[in-house]
Amino acid sequence: MNIKISNMKYDFHTHSKYSADGYVEPKTMVKIAAKVGLSGIGVTDHNTIKGGLAAKKYENDEIQVIVGSEILTDKGEVIGIFLTEEIKSTLFIDVIEEIKAQNGVVVVPHPFDGIRSTSLHPTHYDARFIDSVEVFNSRCVRQAYNDMAKDYAKENYLNSIAGSDAHFENEIGNAGVETDSDNIKEAVLSGNVTVFGKRSNIINPVTTKLLKIWRGPKI
């Protein structure tokens, strides 16, 4: 689905109620995305595409929904976007292969984040498996982590991407990419995007942790 709007803006990293640490209804996420001026939203729930598929039902001429998932691998978290099927593997290389097999795009979210134990710390060797690096994540407590991600992308000639990592309504659209292309997948793969973003209130990630603890294991 191509939406012909100039200066299109996409938030490529959000979570719905289908994540253990999320609670927002997919339908609500699409409505908010439109309200804050996004052209599209990537729903990337932890280890499942259920949220993205649910949100896709509410896609319209104003908002494009990109189905994705943030998968916890043996090396750290990897995001696959433009997915059509669940990722079943948990080994880093196997997850990459599954994403590629369905013509998805491999993104490393919040790399080098020293606070999140699930963050991937990619090496120069790993770069060959990566399409885009999330060089701005609104929930990175320290800007230095985003700067390290940006440096890694530049040093390894990788494309940049960004996302809010929203778990609550007020975070959707806090970060993402802007492009004048009417084919967002092509724009992402070619690097024809400009990153934008602002930091999330520290209360949001703290509340997310409390919510996850309260719920217990889910996904």
Image (spheres, rainbow, N blue to C red):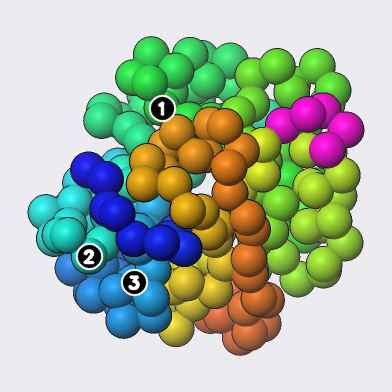
Which is more N-terminal, label 1 or label 3? 3
Q: Secondary structure at mark 2?
A: loop
The numbered mark at residue 62 is 2
Q: Which residues are magenta?
A: 154-158
Query: Residue at image x 63%, y 70%?
Result: 197
Q: At which x and y percent is residue 92? A: 59, 22
Q: Amino acid at mark 1?
A: Gly
Q: At which x and y percent is residue 111? A: 73, 45
Vertical placement of residue 164 versus 184, above or below: below
Magenta region, main secondary structure: loop
* Residue 155 within the magenta-colored segment of the rendering: yes
User: Separation of disc 2 and disc 1 at Cα?
Assistant: 23 Å
**Residue neighbourhood size for the residue with mark 1, other residues' Cα within 10 Å, grouped as few (<14), some (14–19), many (≥20):** many
Q: Is 88 left, or right, of 157 in this rendering?
A: left
Where residue 139 sits, quadrant-wise, is bottom right
Q: At which x and y percent is residue 88? A: 36, 24
Vertical placement of residue 140 versus 98, above or below: below
Q: Amino acid at mark 2?
A: Glu
Q: Nearer the viewer, mark 2 or mark 1?
A: 2
Query: Residue at image x 34%, y 72%?
Result: 33
Q: Is 2 left, or right, of 194 in this rendering?
A: left
Residue at the spot of label 3? 33
**Residue neighbourhood size for the residue with mark 2, other residues' Cα within 10 Å, grouped as few (<14), some (14–19), many (≥20):** some
